[in-house]
Image: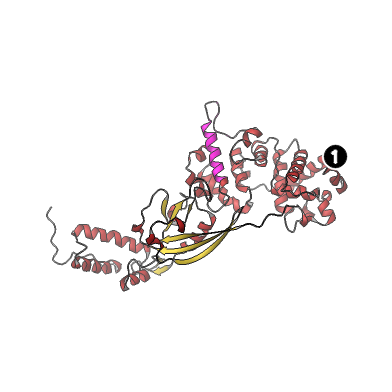
Amino acid sequence: MVDGVVAREIAVKPLDAFFVSAWQSAIVHWYHCCGRKQLPWQNNPAPYRVWVSEVMLQQTQVSTVIPYYQRFLQRFPTVEGLAQATLDEVLAQWSGLGYYSRAHHLHAAARQLYAAQSEKNPVRLPEDLEALMALPGIGRSTAGAIRALGFGNPGVILDGNVKRVLSRVFLLDVPINSTAGERRLWSLAEHLTPAVEFAAYAQAMMDLGAGVCRQKNPHCAECPVENLCLARKEGVQEQYPLKKSGKRLPVRENAALVIENEWGEVLLCRQPDKGLWAGLYVFPEKSQIENTELLQGLQYATTIQHTFSHYVLHWQLWKKNILKEKIIETPDQVWYHRSENLTTIGLPAPVLRYLEKLSMSRMVMCRKYHQELPGLAFAPFPGAKGQEIFEQVSQRAWQEWLKHQTMLINENHLNMMDAKSQSFLGEQLQKFLDNEAYERPKGYVAPKS
């Protein structure tokens, strides 16, 4: 058995062959008996499937990634399918997962591979390490994981989990987020990676960091290299890895409008392809609203705090109700309804969470259908009648009435400026909601054909 003293020595010197052999055997054996083998990307671990999983797993936990991964692969099962999709379609599948540059890079890389295809070179990921790292969004560790897990080739990985394991075992005295720390860790990772069982070793190191050598409350008794770990020996596991203290993030403030129409749809605007939330749909910024009518009668809704890598955003949201006909949709400006738009446009996590709260629709006992259904977002017109409809009529019934009303106007050639026509439609609205038969207007004369 190799002891921890050897680990301290080899952390700064060339690795001892005996230590390396013992390490590799312990790690691989542990994977075969205890490692995870039922993750979705382990079923048919083709290079493309591994690539998507590794990109999603960057800075995101496995439990969060799994449902996103499954939906993404169902929608884009191949590199070709991903390349031929629009960016909006890709971002829609990424909505809520965060770090959207990953989706941009994934899509760009797929298009790059698709554009380079030929009869001799079909669309597929390259096996060569340098060629993989030349693709957008694929770094050294991701490329190593694709080689090891996707191709079964030698591949060195060094994600956050592996860094934590190595830092503790060797009691590294440099911050892992420093240049010197990165260099030491990569040197250790390269020398410890075996020349066989590449996939088993790579997966074992990730599993070990995720499930055993955890950031807090590590399960040291379950670790296959517990006897080698200097941090365990000195009882300082949770003090490692060392990290450079980050600067306090500055705070930025912004304000946006949550503009909702009578159907409960919310106006969203597409962000430019570069910058904050690039290509995603968000609430329109208050400072960019040119229509002064939209800025009248605003109601404060909430302030969302969202942390980015370089700053903290305090995002004030102000509510405004407006009739749908007042704002025309364009490719970059849409009325969003959760059931219709969820798979077609991308939304950042703060917007998605707020919309989910809004989508818990106000329920009413619908006068026409005699069951609880989602009600209108606000009264369709002022006065007692508008309030009655707001309280008793569902979205479904009101939409049906508007279609029925259009039929009545066209069929009877009604003049909507005429008081008799208005009175007739009011009577027909009551009959419609009470499921009574439609009647012709009194004194009606059918137009000549």
Q: Which residue is mark 1?
A: 18
* Residue lying at the far bottom of the rendered structure: 384
Residue 138 at what x, y percent from top left?
Answer: 62, 40
Side of 72 where 207 appears, left or right: right
Q: How is the image coloured?
A: secondary structure
Q: Nearer the viewer, residue 400 or 325?
A: 325
Q: Is residue 113 magenta?
A: yes
Give residue 179's quadrant in the image: top right
Side of 43 where 202 appears, left or right: right
Mark 1 closeness class: few <14, some 14–19, many ≥20 residues within 10 Å: few
On screen, residue 47 above or below 177: above
Q: Magenta stretch: dominant SS?
A: helix
Q: Nearer the viewer, residue 99 or 181?
A: 181
On screen, residue 405 above or below 149: below
Residue shown at 59% from the left, 50% from the top? 66
Q: Nearer the viewer, residue 46 or 65?
A: 65
Question: In what quadrant of the picture does the N terminus appear?
Answer: top right
Residue 187 at what x, y percent from top left?
Answer: 76, 40
What is the span of residues highlighted in magenta in the rendered image?
102-124
Residue 292 at what x, y percent from top left?
Answer: 38, 60
Q: Is residue 34 visible?
A: no
Q: Is residue 12 magenta?
A: no
* Residue lying at the far top of the rendered structure: 120
On screen, residue 307 above or below 104: below
